[in-house]
Image (cartoon, rainbow, N blue to C red):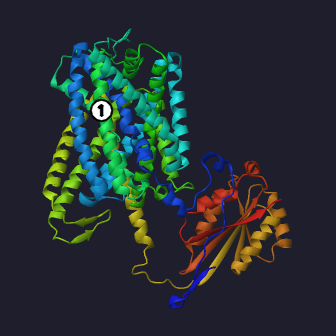
Amino acid sequence: MPNMDQDNNTPVQHRTDAFRPRNSWQTWLIGRPLQTADAPYETIGKLVGLAVFASDALSSTAYATQEILFILAAAGAGAFAYAFPISIVIVGLLAIVTLSYEQIIHAYPGGGGAYIVARDNLGELPAQVAGASLLTDYILTVAVSISSGVAQVTSAFPALYEYRVEIAVGLVLFMMLVNLRGVRESGAVFAIPSYFFLLVMSLTVLVGMFRYVMGSLGQVAGPPPIETLHTGQAISLFLILHAFSSGTTALTGVEAISNGITAFREPRSRNAGITLIWMSSILAVLFLGITFLSGQISAVPSEMETVISQLARTVFGGRNVIYLAIIAGTMVILVMAANTSYAGFPRLSALLGQDGFLPRQLAYRGSRLVYSRGIVALALVACVLIIVFQASVTGLIPLYAIGVFLSFTLSQAGMARRWWKTGRLATGQAIEERGSVLRYERGWPTKMIINGFGALCTTLVTLVFAVTKFRDGAWVVLILIPVLVVGFSAIHRHYRRLAGRLSLDQFAEPPRISRHRVILPISSVHQGTLAALRYAVALSDDVTAVHVCLEPGDAPKIQQKWEMWGKGVRLVILDSPYRLMIEPLLRYIEEIAAKRQPNEIITIVVPQFVPKRRWHNLLHAQTATWLRLALLFKPGIVVTDVPYQVE
């Protein structure tokens, strides 16, 4: 039953719409629409959360080692010995970043990660930089992970190498469709393959370590030729740092859980924090194990056969069933890695949309309670990147990770300042910010030092990445992020100006409309014209019909019919020597508008007939549509359509 609220003598009626969306092709494709009240039941637990949000970080074990070797190969195979020490340093950095994001998860239970932390503690510009960095990283995650997954398949089946771009694009679109079905459903779909990868990769590392200890591991048989972008280099600090920056791709995806806390079941922060610890621990063990074993079997970097493929066939003695299972599992987790972006990108773009830095449409949830527009936008941009770079992991990697490390730096710097602010509060005092509540915490100096040290480390890594990868393509991201920030600022200015123009603060009610003039454009005199005429006469006594005459012989016919059916309304015939339809009419309307009196409104009533079948519109000139678009930006003019349905 509707409620009636009579406060202040203003009747307000509250109703719940009983309409239920009908089944359609969209229902078959992405599932039945969900009510807003279903949102609490669409959350996920820790096990499914690991599959949804950790697949990006875990999948990086499939290519991080290979990317280190690609850089070291420039100094020859002897430089491969540095791969394992580099991986140890990367794991140490992982521990620092994980500790920082675990704090963010509990401090900001509403999600948002680096963007929210920077916004509340560092200001608007750093927040925009963090947002641009993460959006760039999410897009590249999809392109890199899908391309890497396809590379695993082409390693096992070289005949498919020529079709790698088509396969990659198809997988991106498949991931888009699954994610449009909702977080809970996509998580359930992807949980089994994700855990299958963990099983087979753990088995590979364990069996490989056992064979190494027993002395039966051996060397890779028939390795592919070594591939590298630059040859003839000496082992130098720059080369080591270059390899380190490539290997830090293993850390991408660590921030995704902090962005998507709201997807977890209650208690959200606790479940998200535990999932983050699980993810980082598994990542560290697998990454160190794969890098160590790759060095022992003398694996070489190549796009024709991945390091994982060489390791699997060496550990298990050839391209047998277990080898194929490992390749399948690796390919699947690399595809699943894109799912982390599909979970994080729409949420982050929704936050930016709510704050007015991206189109507000991105903040609206779709029929399955996910941010559908963000999911589709991510898929389309990732497809463009895959096509441009021909699904080459080596070509995409230089663009990768610099954005995420920039966001790491901003988030940890923001957290350090947050702890400093809490230290200024009295015990029991609380200050509510946009993303969290500040309270005094006893251990704030230690936490501030930890986050400050983390910010320093990730700043150094960002600089190393920018310098060492600049020539390989990192300059694209270094330009793209500022361009995105400028775009954010332009969008934000528009929304701010619009809000100012629409604000009711200090708004004085304008005088009542003193005169209402109606102009009725007609192409001919028919039933649709008369329907529009009846509506125009109901609006005002001051109605003028206007006909643009393209051929001299048409004017007498129009005039004769109008005298019979026009109900005495005046008719203006505009001769058009150049047979233009819209321009003479617009010029006439502008002349009338220029003479408009104060508090006078001009309404253009546009007759438009609507055929029974939509494709029939293609058979007509759609003059009414073009006229409406042309008049939309004319101040002081109201455009009204009067549709006439033709059976």
Quick one: SS at disc 1? helix
Task: Point out the residue furthest to the top here.
Answer: 222
Give how far across and how far down residue 141 sits, in percent: 40, 38
Q: Residues within 10 Å of mark 1 (few under 14, many from 20)?
A: some
Give how far across and how far down residue 52 sits, in percent: 44, 44
Residue name at image x 84 percent, y 62 percent: 557
Out of 330 and 508, give the one closest to the viewer. 330
Give how far across and how far down residue 400 sits, in percent: 34, 35
Q: Say whether residue 261 is left or right of residue 93.
A: right
Residue name at image x 30 percent, y 51 percent: 114
Give how far across and how far down residue 644 sits, in percent: 77, 64
Q: What residue is shown with label 1?
A: 285
> Can I make out residue 647 in this image?
yes
Image quadrant occupied by the C terminus: bottom right
Q: Say whether residue 475 is left or right of residue 146.
A: left
Out of 627 and 52, give the one closest to the viewer. 52
